Amino acid sequence: MGAAAHLGIKLGEYDAAIRTLIPHYEELIAAAGAAVGATARTAPAVVDLGTGSGALAHAILKARPKARLVGIDEDAGMLTMAEKRLRGRLETVHGNFEETAIPRCDVISASFALHHIPTGRRKAAMYQRCFNALRPGGVIVSADCCLASSTALKQSHRAAWLGHLQAHHSRAKAEKYLRTWAKEDVYFTLDREVELLKEAGFGVEIAFRKTCFAVVVGLK
Ligand SMILES: C[S@@+](CC[C@H](N)C(=O)[O-])C[C@H]1O[C@@H](n2cnc3c(N)ncnc32)[C@H](O)[C@@H]1O
């Protein structure tokens, strides 16, 4: 299934629609872009996993204008949008990021992409591949939904997400979105994400946290 179909939107509407679906989307992308500052390199080689329409790659260029960017995505339509947005600054690779070789690099980034990895075992393997691909001093930056560990907080974060959806969509549609994504996407707790990154060898920092959304940074 293409990314737009998964989200229940039309491909050309992705950039407008994603803001109605994900609370704090712009803040998260900006924070993830800025987090690339954790690498000392001024012209880092960056691999953006699940690059979509290129929002994060674009934000990374703001923080590191000399960055060399590769975007991997299995949705050709999304990659075409990313190529238009990045105008010659992004090399695209059409493929599954769990299977495609990750080139040697200084930064691996992802926004709202790694929740498509369905199991902890596969996510651990992905983080290990990322660790192995990064040069010493490299970083992995991921912006995504990372659940709270407490049930009460989890419920309050879900209510906040529903509230954001209902500001843009009917209550029925908002609830359907959350039900559908709960079946298709796999969110781990922030604690578990940190553990998985540490198990792969990373030191971990949290660059941004608002309700259930976070920018997690792993340092090699
Ligand atoms: C919700 S979109 C996020 C796009 C973009 N990073 C953003 O923040 O707007 C998820 C993207 O990840 C891609 N994706 C999901 N699983 C993938 C996989 N296993 N391999 C490659 N791309 C994948 C989808 O095609 C989609 O473009």
Image (tube, rainbow, N blue to C red):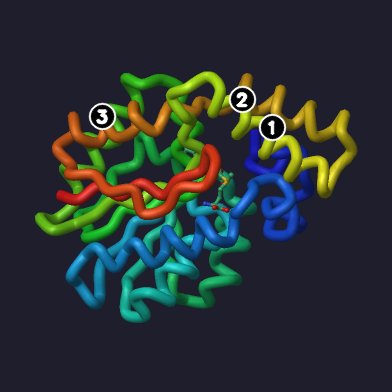
The mark nearer the N terminus, 1 or 3, is 1
Can residue 49 be seen by looking at this rendering? no
Question: Which of the 4 image quarters holds residue 190?
Answer: top left
Q: Residue furthest front?
A: 152
Q: Residue furthest left?
A: 136
Categorize mark 3 by other alpha carbons within 10 Å: few (<14), some (14-19), many (20+).
Answer: some
Q: Secondary structure at mark 2?
A: helix
Q: Position of residue 69 (x, y in %)?
A: 37, 66
Identify whether 45 is placed above or below 93. below
Residue with the mark numbered 3: 195
Cα distance in 3D space between marks 2 and 3: 23 Å
Q: Secondary structure at mark 1?
A: helix
Q: Nearer the viewer, residue 188 or 59?
A: 188
Q: Secondary structure at mark 3?
A: helix
> Which residue type does callout 3 highlight?
Glu
Q: Position of residue 123 (x, y in %)?
A: 34, 28
- Is residue 179 left or right of 96 when viewed as pictured? right
Residue with the mark numbered 2: 155
Residue with the mark numbered 1: 159
